[in-house]
Each structure stands twice: as C-alpha cells, then as structure tokens.
C-alpha cells in the first residue's frame, strides 16, 4: 500500500481527527456523545465532513468498504439524532441515542486504524493491509472496547433511571 497521500487525503485526515477528539471529550465529560449539546453538534458536523471527504478517496476505484462504513455511520447518527421524535421509544430513547452515537464513533475508528497501521511509519508501515494480523487484532480490540464501553453506558443509564 502506498504511503503517499493526496491533498484530499490530507484534508480528510485533518478533518477526521476533529470528531475523534470531540468524541473522546464527550465520553470523558458526559459519558456519551449527546447530539443536543455543543460537543455533540460539532461531532455530527465534523463526522459528516469526514464522511463526505472520504467519498473522494479510494485506493481501489469505486465504492469500497470504507464508504459503506461512512454510510452506516451517517445512518446511525441520523437514527440517534431523530430518536427523540419517535413516539414509541419511551424509556428506550436514551439507550438508542447513546448507543447509535457510540457505534458511529467505532465506525470512525475502523478505517482510521487500518489507514494508520498501513501507512505509518512512512516507508516501513506496521501492516500491509486490512487482512494483516496487526490490523485484525487492533480492530478486535476496538470492538471489545466498544462492547465494554457500551455496557458501561447502559449500566449508567439504568442507574440514572432508577435514581429518577
């Protein structure tokens, strides 16, 4: 895999770091990405920009798995953002909102991990491609962190329901 980046690739990478930082800030401050507050709104805007710029990138011609992950992340954020307008959700609303945004954050990390490990260090990347054991183990680690984090979020939401 080539380690050189196009101008769009560099712009996309810089843009993509912003929702990563915002997501970490939201998790640290609020335990979740909340689309109703400032950090959550900025997260959505920068995720959309990251996803839109990704469509101009492709190591293979045409639609690729990274594009599919972007569309899935958009769908998850849309579901989380409009969940409050769905009447039948009731007590499930905070769970839907929290878990959809957490899943969108996971999807941001998947191509980021692959691209980082297959491009850095420049000239001698740590991995040769998405099938590389290092990439696969890293993605498995992310999935486990997501499952642990989501379980913690559900636990916290249940606790706040009981306290109310």
Image: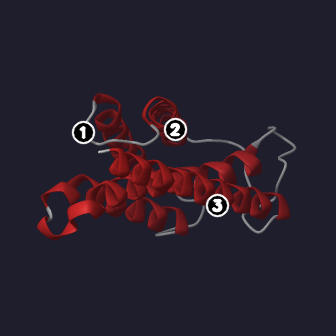
Depth order, front residue of 138/98:
98
Under tag 1, what secondary structure? loop
Under tag 2, what secondary structure? helix
Hey, which quadrant is residue 9 in on the image? Answer: top right
Left or right of 148 in this view: 73: left
Mark sitting earlier along the chain (1/3): 1
Mark sitting earlier along the chain (2/3): 2
Q: Residue at x 84, y 41 (%)?
A: 123
Q: Residue at x 52, y 62 (%)?
A: 66
Please state, as top left, top right, bottom left or bottom right, where the C terminus lies in the image: top left
Left or right of 76 in this view: 131: right
Q: Which residue is mark 3?
A: 143
Q: How many residues crowd mark 3 within 10 Å: few (<14), some (14–19), many (20+)? A: some
Left or right of 135 in this view: 151: left
- Label for residue 79? none
Q: Residue at x 49, y 37 (%)?
A: 27
Under tag 3, what secondary structure? helix
Q: Which residue is mark 2?
A: 20
Q: Is residue 55 visible?
A: no
* Numbered-mark total: 3
Q: Which residue is mark 1?
A: 36
Depth order, front residue of 80/62:
80
Depth order, front residue of 33/52:
33
Q: Is residue 47 above or below residue 74?
A: above
Q: Residue at x 29, y 42 (%)?
A: 35
Label 2 vs label 3, nearer the camera: 3
Depth order, front residue of 1/21:
21
Q: Is residue 34 above or below residue 113?
A: above
Hey, which quadrant is residue 90 in on the image? Answer: bottom left
């Amino acid at each position: 895999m080539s380690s050189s980046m196009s101008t769009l690739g560099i712009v996309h990478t810089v843009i993509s770091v912003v929702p990563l930082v915002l997501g970490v800030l939201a998790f640290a401050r609020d335990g979740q990405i909340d689309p109703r507050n400032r950090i959550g709104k900025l997260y959505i805007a920068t995720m959309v920009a990251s996803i839109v710029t990704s469509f101009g990138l492709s190591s293979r011609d045409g639609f690729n798995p990274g594009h599919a992950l972007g569309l899935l992340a958009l769908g998850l954020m849309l579901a989380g953002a409009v969940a409050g307008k769905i009447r039948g959700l009731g007590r499930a609303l905070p769970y839907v909102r929290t878990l959809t945004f957490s899943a969108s954050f996971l999807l941001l990390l998947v191509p980021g991990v692959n691209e980082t490990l297959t491009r850095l260090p420049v000239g001698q990347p740590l991995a040769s491609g998405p099938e590389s054991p290092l990439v696969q183990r890293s993605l498995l680690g992310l999935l486990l962190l997501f499952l642990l984090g989501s379980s913690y979020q559900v636990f916290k939401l249940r606790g706040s329901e009981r306290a109310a």
